[in-house]
Image (tube, rainbow, N blue to C red):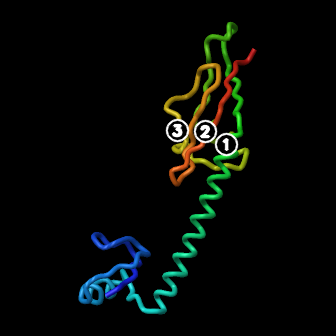
Amino acid sequence: MKIILFQDVKGIGKKGELKEVKDGYGKNFLIAKGLAKPATPEHMAKYHQDQAHHAAQVQKQTTNIESHKTKIASLIMEAILKTDKNGKGVFDSVNKQSIKEFLANLGIEVAPEHILLEKPIKEIGNHVVLINLGQGIEASLKILVTHSK
C-alpha cells in the first residue's frame, strides 16, 4: 500500500514522503493514528502540488542566499579600535555582535551563531570572517581594522 506521511515516522520516513508499506500497518496504524493518508489520486495531486510549492520555496531561498553571499563578498567592514597613545595596546575589539549589526544595517539578518568567529578581533590589519548563510553556503566578509589616532 502506498501512503503519504504527514509526520516523521521512525523507521519509515519523513513528513511529506511517499512510501510503500504493508497494508495492515498502513491502514491500522499509520492512517488510523493520522500519521499518513492513502496515496489516492486526490491525495497524490495534493502531494505533487505541495512538492512543487516546496521546491519553489527552496529555489527562492537559495537565490536569496546567493544574492546575500555576493553582496557580503563585495563589502569591506571598516572598524576603528581604541588604542593607547603608541597605537600598540588595543582596548576594543570586533566581535560577533558588531558584525551582526554591520550586516543588519545593510538589510542582511544573520544570527550571531552563524558568524564563524572563534574569538574577537583585536589586531590591526585585514581579516576575513566566514558567515554561514544556510544550505551549506558561506560568505567571506572582509574586515579592515585600524586604530584611532
Q: Residue visible at 67% across and 24% down?
A: 145
Return the residue at label 3: 116
Return the residue at label 1: 72
Circles 1 and 2, Cβ within 8 Å, touching? The answer is: yes
Q: Residue furthest right?
A: 149
- Which amino acid does the dot numbered 1 rest on? Ile
Direction from residue 8 to residue 84 in the image, left or right: right
Q: Position of residue 26 (x, y in %)?
A: 29, 86
Q: Quadrant of residue 102?
A: top right
- Which amino acid does the dot numbered 3 rest on? Leu
Q: Position of residue 47 (x, y in %)?
A: 49, 82
Q: Is residue 77 above or below residue 13?
A: above
- Which amino acid does the dot numbered 2 rest on? Ser
On-image quarter of the C terminus: top right
Return the residue at label 2: 140
Q: Residue furthest top?
A: 86
Q: How many marks?
A: 3
Separation (CA) of disc 3 from disc 1: 14 Å
* SS at badge 1: helix
Q: Position of residue 48 (x, y in %)?
A: 51, 81
